[in-house]
Structures are given as structure tokens and as C-alpha cells.
Amino acid sequence: TPAQAYATLARRTREPLRSARAVCTALAIPAAETDRRLDDCYDALLANPRPNSEADTGELLEALGVFDVPKTLTPHELAVVDLFLTAIDALGDIRAGHQHGLTRWFTTGNLTAAYLSLTATKPLPTTGN
């Protein structure tokens, strides 16, 4: 997995940022997107790593979506994402963790998972419709 590849590289090189960048490069994630993703988590995960924490850091990077391979969505898929966003508005918003998951599914083109996740979500009592 990307998390395991990161852990192996980071353990061998002792360079967490370069290791994460190498995994992203191997996954063909564009350099600008890699920079944005790693900038978002650098201070918390890569700046001062704890000894022997490479596996945990790799799993966190993976859970945060750092290693998600972006998919170019078709016009039809983009229209579906717009409808999902309309549904989220009708729900009265959603939890931050749920939003993170949806963003990852939109990025990777996993619209079926996004749909199933949204169908299981109840509207907020005060703002949902």
C-alpha cells in the first residue's frame, strides 16, 4: 500500500517529506497537487517525526488522502457531484469527517461510495430539509 511504501522509505532514508513526495510521484499525483497536500500536513506529521512512527505516519497520510490518485471526472460525473452538493445543502450540512470522506471520493471518482454514504445520512434537525 502507499502507507507501507512510505513507512519503508521513511525508515530507510530518515527523510519523511522526501519519502511522502516519492510515494506521490510513484502514484503519478501531479507535483502541484502533491505540494498542496504535503503543505497541509507537514507541520503536524512530517516536520518533527517521532522515532519508529513511520508506519503510523504512513497510515495517517493515507487516511488524510495524501496518497489518493485523482481522477479526471467526465462532464456527467461533474454533474453528479453538483447534485451531491445540492443534497448536502438540503441535509443542512454534514459532519467534517463525513465531508472529508466525500471530498476523497469525489477526488478519486468513487461516486458510488459517495452516494451510498449520503443515502445513509439523516438531515440535521434544525437546518435540514
Image (cartoon, rainbow, N blue to C red):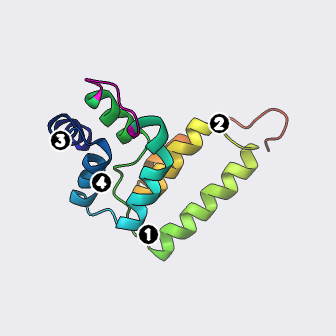
Tell me what residue is drawn at x 52 percent, y 51 percent. Answer: 103
Does residue 28 appear left or right of residue 61 in this picture?
Answer: left
What is the CA distance from the residue labelled 4 to the residue labelled 2?
Answer: 30 Å
Q: What element carries label 1?
A: loop
Q: Which amino acid does label 1 sit on?
A: Leu
Marker disc for residue 73: 1
Q: Name the residue under label 2.
A: 95
Q: In what element is the residue under mark 2?
A: loop
Q: Residue at x 38, y 59 (%)?
A: 34
Residues rendered magenta in the picture: 46-53
Which numbered disc, 4 or 2, marks the residue closer to the eye? 4
Q: How crowded is mark 3: few (under 14 residues within 10 Å), some or many (20 or more)?
A: few
CA separation in Å, label 4 and label 3: 13 Å
Question: Could you say which is closer to the camera, residue 50 or residue 40?
Answer: 50
Q: Where is 105 relative to 101, above or below?
A: below
Residue 74 % position (x, y) = 44, 73
The mark that comes first in sequence, 3 or 2, is: 3
Q: Nearer the viewer, residue 119 or 46?
A: 46
